[in-house]
Image: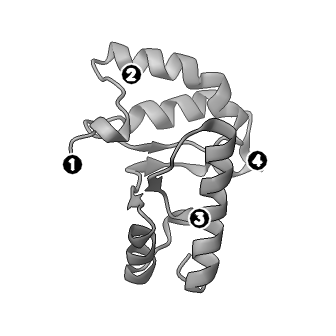
Amino acid sequence: MPDLEDEKIKTEVMDLHTVIYKKFGYEMKYIRPPKGEFSERTINLTNSLGYTTVMWSFAYDDWDEGKQGREEYAKKKILDNIHPGAVILLHGNSKDNTNVLDSVIKEVKNMGYEFKSLDKFER
């Protein structure tokens, strides 16, 4: 994101915003910088578009489609990194995440944690 010109960022973010709203009726207000790459300029720009930047506290190499078929690894990585206030980044292209998500959610709840929307997250 820091390598893009302001207009390119605005176009990409607002085009996505429009698509999400048209398809799902949801007004996006949070943004996660791709690859976690940002600068003061990009944060200020996305703020000016009405977005709040949210980073994650944990991610792993689940985005790599060449590293699938490691469901127990995925489950362990996620569960070993749960903590109060955790924001876990899981990529939608990961079949491992899809296959373990139900059991991970149940296990996290059994550990005494709850899931909240970012709107209800204490800052």
Q: Nearer the viewer, residue 43 or 76?
A: 43
Give the structural element (helix, strand or loop) at label 3: helix
Q: Is residue 62 above or below residue 35?
A: above
Bin the neighbour count of mark 2 within 10 Å (Cα to Cα): few under 14, some 14-19, many 20 and up: some
For the residue pair 122 and 87, the one nearer the viewer reads as: 122
Which residue in the structure is indicated by mark 4? 65
Residue type pointed to by label 4 = Glu
Q: Farthest residue to the right: give it.
A: 66
Give the amino acid type for the residue marked by disc 1 in the picture: Arg
Q: Position of residue 32 (x, y in %)?
A: 49, 58
Q: Amino acid at mark 3?
A: Val
Label 1 element class = loop
**First of labels 2, 4 by sequence position:** 4
Which of the two discs, 4 and 3, labels the residue nearer the N terminus? 3
Label 1 belongs to which residue? Answer: 123
Of callouts 1 and 4, the N-terminal one: 4
Q: Earlier in the sequence, mark 2 or mark 3?
A: 3
Residue annotated with mark 3: 13
Number of the label disc, if any, that sits on residue 108:
2
- Disc with the residue nearer the chain's start (1 vs 2): 2
Q: Amino acid at mark 2?
A: Val
Q: Mark 1 near mark 2, Cβ–Cβ under 8 Å?
A: no
- Say which of marks 1 and 2 sits in front: 1
* Mark 4 burial class by Cα count in 10 Å: few <14, some 14-19, many 20+: few
Instruction: Decide: few, some or many residues near mark 1? Use Cα within 10 Å; few <14, some 14-19, many ≥20.
Output: few
Secondary element type, mark 2? helix
